[in-house]
């Protein structure tokens, strides 16, 4: 059997449908994690929405509109933010004394999957409020995060959205007797794409999502020099057979605390992203990192901090996979986060001086003193190498 020229000994070649023909990643070595469960309880279809608590709903809504969301529901205690695609809201914010991420909701195929999941986890199916409709099963992942699986929710109708620009590129003429004038306005969020979470029990948490929700891994990353200890990050997609899904709906990474990292929202194209970014800058908001193009997932990206400190991403042009591709494997480096664009910032990497980095430093001390997690001194050395790479 011919080995792919970039593969390490023992890796799959292109006939095994790994990522070898897509970019520099390599397939799994013998005995490494397969990236999927043999018999998951259910297979969710997509991410549905994210839930937060924030103390100031007016401030949250002002940023959300500048970022490109549309308000679909608002009262004194709750704010729903949507994109232009038909479906559920992307984000639900409830008034709380402190800002915190409550958890994600995933969409099941139907209520029968909720019943199957409830039986397997000794929970129950219960109705969602009338503002959402449908039913839900509430679970806890190994890190204690609430994970909701919903079905039969009421769909919001589609809204008019930003049309992608027409380009004259590579000798192909698609725009004649017309100028290119994308307006400097909010980017126009289409939909929620993914959420990234950090876990002190990365492998246990990964297996939980694969076994309970039927998610499958698109890419594994590992610390340089520590591949034999297993991966420390995974980009995970829904398994819908031949139906194409986002390269990742969920990403998990090992770290010294269990926390939200960022969430990502699709916009129509690069011009919408760039013009919308100028609008956010004009409004006084902070760009964390961008604009650039990722490697895993290929998205063009732009990252922002909302007024409560949460990292949120505009993205466009994401990879779409069916279930046939096996996971890619690559070392984790800061320089490996993007194909082009500015270097990853200290703010994006979580090492800029400030409240967040101080909290993470305290978490490192706590994690290293505990035996009930996967974050040890060797993993800390690997993480520090990532931050300086």
Image (tube, rainbow, N blue to C red):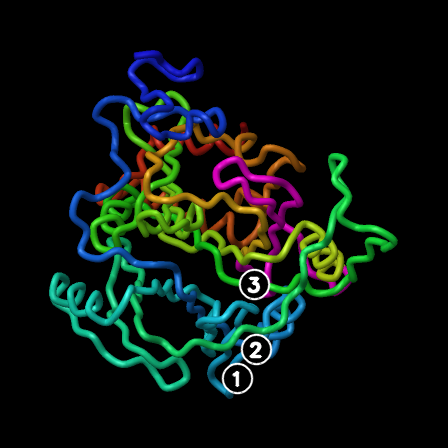
Identify the residue position indicated by label 2 in the image: 71
Q: Which of marks 3 and 1 is nearer the N terminus?
A: 1
Cα separation, mark 3 vs mark 1, equals 20 Å
Q: Tag 3 or tag 2, which sits nearer the N-term?
A: 2
Closer to the camera in the image, 247 or 381: 247
Above or below, 228 against 45 in this view is: above
Please tell me whether residue 303 belongs to the stretch shown in magenta. Answer: yes
Q: In which quarter of the image is residue 50?
A: bottom left
Residue 308 rendering spot, x and y as whole percentages: 56, 65
Task: Residue 25 in the image: state x and y as whole percent.
Answer: 44, 26
**Helix, strand or loop at mark 2:** strand
The image quadrant that residue 276 belongs to is bottom right
Q: Which of marks 3 and 1 is in front?
A: 3
Q: In which quarter of the image is the N terminus?
A: top left
Q: Give left or right: position of 292 versus 227.
A: right
Please state which of the two labelled residues, at mark 2 or mark 3, is closer to the viewer.
3
- To which residue does mark 1 refer? 74
Q: State the image quarter where residue 113 is shown.
A: bottom left
Q: Is residue 21 one of those drawn in magenta?
A: no
> Dot 1 surroundings within 10 Å: few (below 14), some, or many (20 or more)?
some
Q: Residue at x 41, y 50 (%)?
A: 245
Magenta span of residues: 282-310
Q: In this view, does 355 lie to the left or right of 104?
A: right
Secondary structure beneath dot 1 equals: strand
Q: Which residue is drawn at 22% across and 45% down?
A: 372
Q: Nearer the viewer, residue 240 or 332?
A: 240
Asked if disc 2 and disc 1 are in contact, CB closer than 8 Å, the reply is: yes
Characterize the local packing of mark 2: few (<14), some (14-19) or many (20 or more) Cα atoms within 10 angstroms: some
Q: Residue 190 carries which label?
A: 3
The answer to whether mark 2 and mark 3 are in CB contact below 8 A is no
Element under disc 3 = loop
Q: Which residue is drawn at 29% across and 64% down?
A: 108
């Amino acid at each position: 059997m011919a080995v792919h020229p970039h593969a390490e000994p023992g890796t799959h070649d292109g006939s095994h449908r790994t990522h070898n023909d897509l970019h520099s990643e390599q397939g799994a070595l013998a005995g490494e994690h397969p990236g999927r469960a043999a018999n998951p309880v259910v297979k969710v279809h997509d991410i549905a929405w994210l839930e937060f608590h924030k103390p100031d709903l007016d401030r949250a809504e002002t940023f959300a509109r500048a970022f490109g969301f549309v308000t679909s529901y608002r009262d004194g205690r709750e704010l729903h933010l949507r994109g232009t695609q038909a479906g559920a809201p992307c984000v639900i914010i409830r008034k709380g004394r402190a800002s915190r991420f409550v958890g994600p909701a995933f969409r099941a195929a139907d209520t029968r999957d909720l019943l199957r999941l409830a039986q397997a986890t000794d929970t129950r199916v219960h109705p969602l409020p009338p503002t959402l409709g449908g039913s839900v099963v509430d679970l806890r992942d190994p890190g204690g995060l609430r994970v909701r699986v919903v079905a039969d929710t009421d769909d919001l109708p589609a809204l008019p959205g930003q049309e992608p620009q027409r380009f004259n590129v590579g000798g192909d003429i698609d725009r004649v007797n017309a100028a290119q004038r994308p307006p400097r306005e909010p980017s126009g969020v289409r939909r929620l794409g993914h959420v990234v979470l950090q876990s002190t029990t990365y492998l246990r948490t990964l297996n939980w999502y694969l076994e309970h929700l039927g998610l499958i891994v698109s890419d594994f990353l590992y610390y340089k020099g520590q591949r034999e200890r297993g991966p420390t990050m995974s980009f995970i997609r829904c398994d819908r057979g031949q139906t194409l899904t986002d390269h990742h709906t969920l990403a998990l990474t090992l770290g010294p605390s269990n926390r939200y990292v960022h969430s990502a929202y699709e916009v129509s194209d690069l011009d919408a992203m760039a013009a919308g970014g100028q609008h956010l800058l004009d409004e006084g908001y902070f760009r964390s990192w961008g604009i650039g193009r990722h490697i895993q997932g290929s998205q063009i990206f732009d990252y922002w901090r909302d007024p409560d400190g949460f990292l949120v991403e505009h993205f466009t042009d994401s990879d779409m996979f069916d279930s046939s591709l096996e996971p890619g494997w690559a070392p984790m480096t800061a320089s490996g986060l993007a194909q082009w664009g500015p270097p990853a910032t200290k703010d994006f990497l979580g090492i800029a001086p400030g409240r967040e980095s101080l909290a993470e430093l305290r978490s490192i001390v706590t994690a290293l003193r505990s035996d009930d997690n996967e974050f040890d001194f060797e993993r800390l050395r690997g993480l520090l190498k990532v931050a300086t790479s």
